[in-house]
Image (spheres, helix red, strand yellow):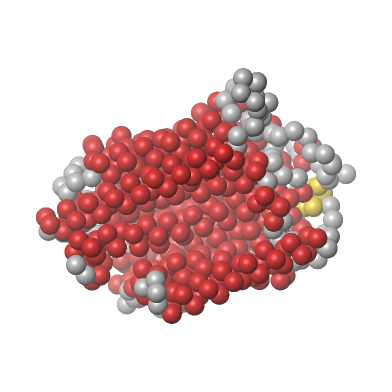
Amino acid sequence: MATAAHTPAHRGRTTLAVVLLGLFTLPMAMSGTTVALPSIGADLDASGGALNWVVTGYFLAASSFMLVAGSLGDLYGRRRLFSLGALLYTVSTVASAAAQNILLLDIARIMVGIGAAGVMATGTALLATIFEGPARTKAFALAGTTGSVGLSLGPTVSGSIVDALGWRTTFLAYAAVGAVILVGSVVLPDARAAVRPKVDKAGAATFISGLALTLFAITQGPQQGWGSLATLLPLALGLGLLVTFVRLERRLAAAGGRPILDISLTGNRKFIAWPLGSFALGAGTGAAMVFLPTYLQGTSGFSAREAGLVLLFLSVPMAVLPQVGARLVNRGVTVRTLLLTSLLLIAAGNIWLGAVLHPGMGTAPLAAPVLVLGAATGLSFGIIDAQALTAVDSSRTGMASGFLNTVRGGTGAVMLTVFGALLLALLEARAGSPEAAGRISSGVAQEALQAEQFSESMRLGLWAVAALVAVLALAVAALTRTGTRPGARSTDRTNTDPAPLAKPTTLQTR
């Protein structure tokens, strides 16, 4: 039976190109949609929560379906799930462009998120199946580069298209690239677990509904109040379903079945440290990526395009440094050292960025701290996936990849809402009312007093992010500690591949 290692070199390059196109375009479509919201709202007569769901719905759907898509890819074939995801993404993006009211657009965007989950979860699993050793490190470094650059370039590219041709054309442009990904998926190799047990339908249903309700409650909190029934009810239901999901998965695993998520993964220190590190990277840069352009427009007179261009200070080092990180790892620097260095730099970058913010500022003071954030993320972003996926059985790489992407997508959804809620609370304490806080945070031009209030609130919020990242860095350090005696030579020499598994596993490949 063929194995992934026997995949021809030319097919490996084709797979890498198709997967990277997906990992570049889908995050770009996600972040780029934010700049189109004012035009969408004016065209469809929408505002508030209904309008915000154009972005939030994508986040929630993608996060909720990542894990399920990865596990289904293990069972039914990763190429098949990749192709289905690309098809759903493309068709739903066309439907988004054609939507005539906000409800239809929100539904279409949720479907776009589900399709994106299939592409991203199975795409990274295909890379882990095909590449080994240093080649795998380089492949995941490229994946980290393209995903990060796509996310950062989204506001700039989409903003230019929206200004020139309108928001519907923006969606059609992304749909055209989705069609290219779909066509390219035909030539991808396939891989799945050798044994195909029954699908864990109960686990999939409880996980998707539980995570979606929990994240929905987080989005409701800032708008409806954290003590309101509209927030507490979905939160209680969501958490209850997630607890049920854990019990169901443990029971199924004990009975010899195939759960959507093997809960033992979360107890594997060698694995769980890397998703935690991924969460820390996303949490540390999310506030700057999402809220800094709005701040600059409201306090310093930046245009939407100019504010989007500031994010190039994030994307340029993200485009270069994943390759540097891969070379450092292949030359003997441990992934642990690289990740912890990145997290400490991110904490410092947020402190620095908060310190330089002031009304009427130009681009120059932003360059250094934002570059630090981009460089720190670029060094470790792609390496994390390679390290995590080599810590699990090869037949479960789809499951593990889905878990990693769930964490990454969930980070975006959580930071989008939690930092926004913190910012509104800080603004309300200074401006005196929720209405005033909402106006200030919307990015409209502010008077001197309001601009200073916005600056103070952003500063405190960024410093809170720095503290969170520092705490997470300590947790990652503890989980990845080798446990050697003082003075003893460390045995942790692995950079991308762990020791051979005790039980050999077999993949079916075509």
281 is higher (above) or lower (below) than 417: above
Q: At which x and y percent is residue 148?
A: 47, 44
Q: At which x and y percent is residue 195?
A: 84, 56
Going by the image, does 10 lie left or right of 449?
right
Displayed quadrant of residue 73? bottom right
Q: At which x and y percent is residue 304?
A: 27, 54
Residue at position x 46%, y 44% from top?
471
Asked if residue 52 shows in the view, the reply is yes
Out of 322 and 40, give the one closest to the viewer: 322
Residue at position x 81%, y 47% from top?
507
Going by the image, does 157 lie left or right of 425?
right
Out of 303 and 166, give the one closest to the viewer: 303
Residue at position x 49%, y 40% from top?
473
Going by the image, does 379 lie left or right of 264?
left
Going by the image, does 392 lie left or right of 379?
right
Residue at position x 29%, y 50% from top?
460
Out of 479 and 458, give the one closest to the viewer: 479
Q: Hey, which residue is sitting farthest right in the picture?
A: 1
Q: Hey, which residue is sitting farthest front in the picture?
A: 486
Asked if residue 92 shows in the view, the reply is no
431 is higher (above) or lower (below) than 470: below
Out of 339 and 124, give the one closest to the viewer: 339
488 is higher (above) or lower (below) than 431: above
111 is higher (above) or lower (below) than 158: below
Q: How many marks?
A: 0
Q: At which x and y percent is residue 11?
A: 70, 40
Q: Quadrant of the N terminus?
A: top right
